Amino acid sequence: MRVVDLIRRKRDAAELLPEEIRYLIDGYTRGDIPDYQMSAWLMAAFLRGLNGAETAALTDAMLHSGQVLDFSDVAGRKVDKHSTGGVGDKTSLIIAPIVVAAGGVRVPMISGRGLGHTGGTLDKLESIPGFSVNLSLAEFRHALEAVGCALIGQTAEIAPADKKMYALRDVTGTVESRSLICASIMSKKLAEGIDALVLDVKVGSGAFLKTEADATLLAELMVETGRRMGKQVVALLTDMDQPLGRTAGNAMEVQESIDVLRGAGPADLRELCLVLAAWMLFLGQRVKSVEEGKSAAAELIASGRALEKFREIVRQQGGDARVIDNPKLLKSAAHTLDVVAAADGFIGATQCEQLGVAVVVLGGGREKKEDSVDPAVGLVFHKRIGDRVARGEALCTLHYNSDARLEEARRLVETAYVITPQAPGAERALVGRVIGG
Amino acid sequence: MRVVDLIRRKRDAAELLPEEIRYLIDGYTRGDIPDYQMSAWLMAAFLRGLNGAETAALTDAMLHSGQVLDFSDVAGRKVDKHSTGGVGDKTSLIIAPIVVAAGGVRVPMISGRGLGHTGGTLDKLESIPGFSVNLSLAEFRHALEAVGCALIGQTAEIAPADKKMYALRDVTGTVESRSLICASIMSKKLAEGIDALVLDVKVGSGAFLKTEADATLLAELMVETGRRMGKQVVALLTDMDQPLGRTAGNAMEVQESIDVLRGAGPADLRELCLVLAAWMLFLGQRVKSVEEGKSAAAELIASGRALEKFREIVRQQGGDARVIDNPKLLKSAAHTLDVVAAADGFIGATQCEQLGVAVVVLGGGREKKEDSVDPAVGLVFHKRIGDRVARGEALCTLHYNSDARLEEARRLVETAYVITPQAPGAERALVGRVIGG
């Protein structure tokens, strides 16, 4: 088998065999196939597309490029959730404790860091003093047994092909391919040793996929790929035309998560968490229906058991659990600045991606992988789409520590809000189509 | 400017600006842009295509990646010819001396080596004992002034971007793109410091471009690109459904070239040389029409002046000019083997590329760039398309030194001849469309 022939065949839109894809991925992971051949193949795959069988073969090859965890000896169903990324999306911090608190379901969660305009679960967790996301695989297993859940970063052992390919895709313009995204997500998630997976596929101005059609195709592909590999996978299309909840920024999002676990917090965030937790409980065979799962999740919040589980998780991973009762222990920014409405009217739409970029500009996210993150900075959103606003009224408050790029962030936020004289039409439902359910 | 954005834009079928293409090529030539980004861009360019303006910009950037020769102080028009490559194509060796012998036109010719199934002018010339194609640029200029012509290989100073990109394209499945082929050819040729260029675009079973439609598109693109860059360029579509002349193999082709210069040789080869030389004389402003050029070329052969010029060229580049009168001084192979007709009938067609591959298999060409070449081996063709053959009659004779891969070569030749019971219809004209004339 010659690599150049595999590149040429994909270039000419031929279907590659599973063993050909495995040859490519194994050779690349070992370093036998150079970056310049892989990047040519990735561009050919990007432009010609991979079909379902090729995508499953790619996922399988990437999954088996490293260690595949086996938690079959740990009691209970292992269920995880993955989001395709958005602004203000802190659901993982809320639903993991809810689901685990129900008992009988375990959540081995390998998460990512913020990249581009989206936040990352690991960065949010690290804003809790002492919290470590760098557990060894032995510690990961121990935490899963001891408290039912662990939230860690991708280790060198898990899907090393994905790690290498993702870095290459980032610099060769081959990120936004459905098949490559699917293989990247699913190879990591299936390596966690889970039985079932709930996918939160974001759609809208703050998502990577802006249209419902694109999001649906990705969701279908991921569900199909998971099933080909013997896993139960359900995908929910959820709205990302505006930020989720009232905050974006790491420490502020931890605080907001605690609020929801306490029974308070913004309605949209609470609702999405209940739905996602319900699906996890359903796939975890803990409840008989998604409706029952939703009631159970609400009850786990009301009883305080979900918050108690969150406390256990924080302690287990070395974090200072006192933050739960004393928000002052979380870092906060030194300064604030309100962005106000320039006219009377209604919030007609938000350029949600810009709001995510503003967080990055303030130092709360990464432009390059090696950037460090300021946990304290971020945005507090006062208005949602459809809200009436008066000229001069605050739309959003910037929390910042340095004014080096403050004006850039302020302009991004200001222009992200579209004020219209009339109230906008019906907005997208928070939870849309369910695929594979 | 970020390279990844240039890759993404070409991926999304946008037109790149000349300065963007220059940024890419300059950065790659300097080594600032890594192979893996260039290969992704090349694949995007391959699949999305480059338009005329982009192709001209690419050619220009590659041309200016190194030294652009300036022979404006050397008297006379500087005219060159380039062939897209075929089997048995030795026209450069014949037309360069004809054109220069006419006086007033100079031929600074930078040629290539055989690659794939095609032969290369440099390999043919090197079968003349002592002949050096590795002249310095100073020696190149001196030869041009002294005898009016020099035939050399690509130096490190000429279009280094092309050298680097060609090697990368070879291993990343991005060779067969019209725009990339055009830029590769034209950047090298325009760096020679010429005023005009005649392109011999081969079409048929022994050419890289098998169909007239493909060959026409490439020819049009090269003519357009040359004109955008202020050069007179004419492209002739010529037949490559069967080998040109009666031999393929380096030393044998030198002998056949000498035969034509002596007024003998095969009719097809002589005819194509007269036409190509006529166009060069016409573009070189030495004659008033192509017809006049053809007569002039025939006269230069008949008078012996073309052969005399060939002798001067050989001497100038260190070759043993005695080969012209004593063919025994050229290497010849130790053994011969006839491939005979399996049935009575007519030669209906030839798989001409296979005949070229057979020469390579015998050791007369290269499978990899670093392979060395045996000048003595090759094929002598006894039959042309349309010829009647009797069962057992020799179609072709293999000249070989080693029988290591003799059977492979024999089968390639045997299966290259298609024998039909009826005479085939009219064959393609030797010289077809003229583009840009």
Image (tube, coloured by chain):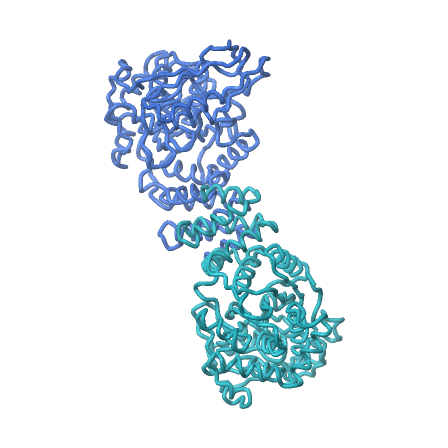
Chain colours: A blue, B cyan
Q: Quadrant of residue B226?
A: bottom right
- The answer to which of A109 and B285 lies nearer the viewer is B285
Image point (61%, 65%), residue name = B197
Percent x, y of residue A217: 54, 34
Total labels drawn: 0
Residue A142: x percent and y percent?
A: 25, 31
Q: Is residue A76 above or below residue B8?
A: above
- Vertical side of A347 occupied by B139: above or below: below
Q: Quick one: B121 or B241, which is closer to the camera?
A: B121
Q: Residue A36's spot in the image, x, y percent?
A: 43, 52
Q: Is residue B285 left or right of residue A407?
A: right
Q: Is residue B376 above or below residue B429?
A: below
Is residue B210 at least partly visible in the picture? yes
Q: Is residue B325 above or below residue A202?
A: below
Residue farthest along the top direction in this orientation: A390
Left or right of B66 on screen, residue B419: right
Residue B354 rendering spot, x and y as whole percentages: 58, 71
A243 vs B76, left or right, is left
At 76% from the left edge and 71% from the top edge, which residue is drawn?
B425
| Residue at (61% x, 57% y) in the render | B230
Q: Residue at x 39, y 30 (%)?
A: A80
Q: Is residue B88 visible?
A: no
Q: Check the picture and name the quadrant holding the C terminus of chain B.
A: bottom right
Q: Nearer the viewer, residue B130 or B227?
A: B227
